[in-house]
């Protein structure tokens, strides 16, 4: 474990996109090793980078500044820790939570763990999101990521639901094929 002398939490800038992608790939790889269903594919990394862009804004290749299109934050500590929380975008669903943010992820490189870096980023994120008008943050922890779950509880997250995964396969349709037919006639 390497010690960070001064853990300064900072907001991301458009120039940090490559750093974000590197750390997010590490996060997805780390979660994949613990049983996540979101593999560290280039497509998933790029999709996450588009959320980064929506929160940060930035300059296009044509030299045009594009303002952020969603409210949210991306935080870093050095080049070794990242947090991304914010608006998940319009989904059309009503909620009893007035203004909720999505906790997309918090990641600290293995060499820098056990130094409360996640806590420092989460504390800063909670204040920033509250100041932006958010009232809640929804997040998940991969089932086998005990440290991530415990860190979330310490940060004040409550366990409100359990996420279940049902894997569908060809064997299901072979079990009782007649029972799975659907009547598509209309009266």
Image (tube, helix red, strand yellow):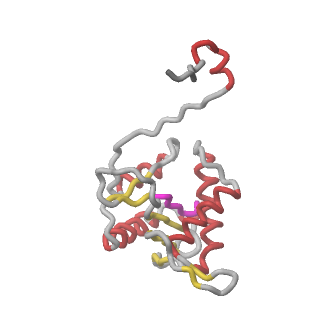
The secondary structure that most of the magenta stretch takes on is strand
Q: How many marks?
A: 0
- Residue at the spot x=40%, y=60% of the render? 101
The residue sitting at the front extreme is 187
Q: Is residue 57 left or right of residue 62?
A: left
Q: Position of residue 85 (x, y in %)?
A: 45, 64
The residue sitting at the bottom extreme is 63
Look at the picture and state if 117 lies above or below 165. Answer: below
Q: Position of residue 169 (x, y in %)?
A: 65, 27
Q: In which quadrant of the rendered image does the N terminus lie?
A: bottom right
Residue 15 is drawn in which quadrant?
bottom right
Q: Is residue 68 left or right of residue 137?
A: right
Look at the picture and state if 50 lies above or below 27. Answer: below
The stretch drawn in magenta includes residue 51? no
- Residue at the spot x=50%, y=75% of the render? 68
Q: Which of 178 and 150 lies nearest the eye of the viewer?
A: 178
- Residue at the spot x=65%, y=20% of the render? 173
Residue 97 is drawn in which quadrant?
bottom left
Q: Position of residue 165 (x, y in %)?
A: 53, 35
Look at the picture and state if 14 lies above or below 127. Answer: below
Q: Position of residue 62 (x, y in %)?
A: 69, 84
Q: Bounds of the magenta span? A: 103-110
Q: Which of 101 and 65 lies nearest the eye of the viewer?
A: 65
Q: Is residue 98 left or right of residue 187?
A: left
Q: Which of 149 and 94 lies nearest the eye of the viewer?
A: 94
């Amino acid at each position: 474990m390497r010690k960070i002398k001064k853990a300064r939490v900072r907001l991301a800038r458009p120039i940090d996109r490559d750093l974000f992608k590197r750390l997010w790939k590490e996060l997805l790889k780390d979660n994949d090793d613990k049983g996540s269903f979101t593999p560290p594919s280039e497509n998933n990394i790029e999709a996450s980078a588009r959320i980064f862009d929506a929160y940060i804004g930035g300059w296009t290749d044509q030299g045009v500044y594009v303002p952020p299109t969603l409210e949210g934050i991306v935080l870093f500590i050095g080049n070794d820790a990242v947090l991304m929380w914010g608006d998940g975008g319009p989904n059309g669903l009503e909620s009893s939570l007035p203004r909720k943010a999505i906790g997309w992820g918090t990641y600290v490189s293995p060499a820098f763990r056990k130094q409360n870096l996640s806590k420092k980023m989460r504390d800063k994120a909670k204040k920033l999101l509250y100041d932006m008008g958010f009232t809640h943050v929804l997040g998940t922890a991969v089932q086998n990521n005990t440290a991530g779950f415990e860190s979330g509880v310490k940060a004040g997250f409550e366990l409100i639901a359990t996420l279940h995964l049902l894997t569908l396969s060809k064997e299901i349709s072979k079990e009782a094929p007649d029972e799975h037919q659907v009547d598509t006639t209309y009266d």
